[in-house]
Image (tube, rainbow, N blue to C red):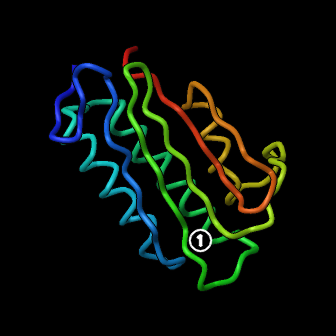
Amino acid sequence: MPTSRDYDEQTGLSAPLELALERNVQAPAIARAAISGLCQDLRLGGSLRQTLVLLISEVVSNAVLHSSGPDDAPITVTAMVTPDVFHVSVSDAGDGFTPAQRDPARVEGGYGLFLVAKAASRWGVDASSPTTVWFELPLTA
């Protein structure tokens, strides 16, 4: 089982990671580094770590590019590990949205939520304000 200074072996829960990011081009890189650091602290590696880093990058990038909220409103990232799953949520000040199917004729863009849907064990969008996209990955294969 993972260990960390913020990991409780009795409950199997980690202290949540919480970030408030400026809505700019640096936000995805900061989120990737934070998730990667949490994975390192919890001794999670391999494909789980790579998938988490990919998905957080996609979801934070979507918030930077597509949020209908004010430009100066932060993007909030929360990550928590339970005994079974790694749960991540990304919120922005947007008005919410309903995910659309990916247009297969579109060559550029439109892959972010498609990748989340393919890689996550569970995911969703809270379609109210603030907009929150969340996903989960199992800790065991």
Residue 25 in percent (x, y) is at 48, 77
Pick the quarter of the image with the N terminus: top left
Q: Is residue 41 above or below residue 129?
A: above
Q: Quadrant of the C terminus?
A: top left
Q: 11 left or right of 55?
A: left
Q: What residue is shown at x 17% (from left), y 30% (from top)?
A: 3
What residue is at 42 percent from the left and 19 percent from the top?
84
Which of the two residues, 92 or 108, is positioned nearer the viewer here? 92
x and y percent of residue 50 in the render? 35, 39
- Circle 1 packing at 10 Å, graded few (<14), some (14-19), many (20+), is many
- The quadrant where residue 27 appears: bottom left
Query: Residue 126 versus residue 63: which sits nearer the camera?
Result: 126
Horizontal side, residue 74 vs residue 12: left or right? right
* Helix, strand or loop under label 1: helix
* Residue bearing the label numbered 1: 64
Establish if 86 lies above or below 71: above
What is the three-letter code of the residue carrying label 1? Val
In the rendered image of this protein, does residue 26 appear above or below residue 109? below
Answer left or right for 56 relative to 127.
left
Residues 92 and 12: in front is 12
Q: Residue at x 50, y 43 (%)?
A: 88
Image coordinates for residue 64, horizontal then vertical, percent = 59, 71
Question: Residue 26: x and y, percent?
Answer: 42, 75
The residue at the point 53 percent across, 32 percent down is 136
